[in-house]
Image (tube, grey):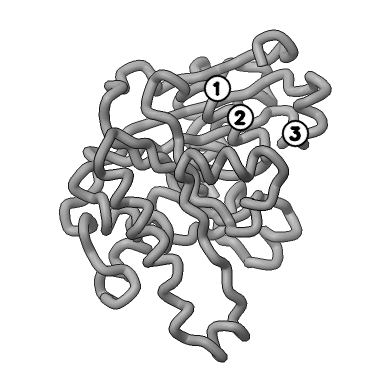
Amino acid sequence: MKLTQRTRWDVAGLGDLPYRGWYMVNCNHQSWVDILVLQHLLNRRIPLLKFFLKRQLIYVPVIGLAWWALDFPFMRRHTDAQLKRHPEKRFDDIEATRRACEKFALVPTSVMNFAEGTRFTHAKHRAQHSPYRHLLRPKAGALALALGALGGRFDSLLDVTIVYPEGAPTFWQFLCGNVHHVVVRARQVPIPAELRGGDYARDPKYRKAFQHWLQALWQEKDATIAGLLGATRMGLEPSEVPEGAKRQWNSP
């Protein structure tokens, strides 16, 4: 990336991260480039990121084998029709997460999750009737399962927000060196004690509390993205934005 990209990086919030620790990393998702941005910025700051991946990605040439060798957890996606025929498959992901977290508990690990579950597009945003301007609805399942299995290891959630002021790039644009400006904001969010170690799949009360917590985080992330985009449209560095302007951009 350093040899091929002429990217201007605007990054804040990654200064005080102890390397040897357990991290639950959460981020918005717009492009394959997000993965490269996260690895580039977090490499050697925290342990290697381990992503929850769709099972089909194990067949990607070369990279799929690398993900398997590095013990990335592969999750099986089932359609509603499949679950109606085989309701027992609803717990496949729980078992896969449990097995992965047994290994993660042995050495410091960074577990990475895109809570939206897929890359943001305006078509998906409209189809979901998402209440957020710049985000899809978050899916709490994988995040809750990891916290349920490893909640005692995580001191906080590392919440990362990525903004591309020129628009989310494609992977091909990245390979061509056309990612000129990336803005990243990170913060450590305390994980409420009552949300560690719960049973998301079988406890409705815990599931509802966890979803409310994640939705509140998503509202804050949506406002952060609006503020950062507003700053770049005015030709300002995000750190130079007047507080009054931030409130104006962040208002519905």
Work out how far the residue at label 3 is from the one at label 2, CA to CA, in angstroms: 12 Å
Residue under numbered circle 1: 40
Q: Nearer the viewer, residue 245 or 226?
A: 226
| Residue 48 in view of the camera | yes
Work out how far the residue at label 3 is from the one at label 1, CA to CA, in angstroms: 16 Å
Measured along the vertical axis of the image, is residue 233 above or below residue 168? above
Which residue is painted at 76% across and 27% down in the image? 174
Relative image position of residue 155 (x, y in whole percent): 22, 38
Which residue is painted at 32% across and 51% down in the image? 101
Amino acid, disc 3: Pro
Q: Secondary structure at mark 2?
A: helix
Q: Report if the CB atoms under discs 1 and 2 are less than 8 Å apart.
A: yes
Q: Disc 3 or 2, which lies upstream in sequence?
A: 2
Measured along the vertical axis of the image, is residue 108 above or below residue 182? below
Q: Secondary structure at mark 3?
A: loop
For this orientation, the residue located farthest to the top is 3
Residue under numbered circle 3: 169
Residue under numbered circle 2: 36
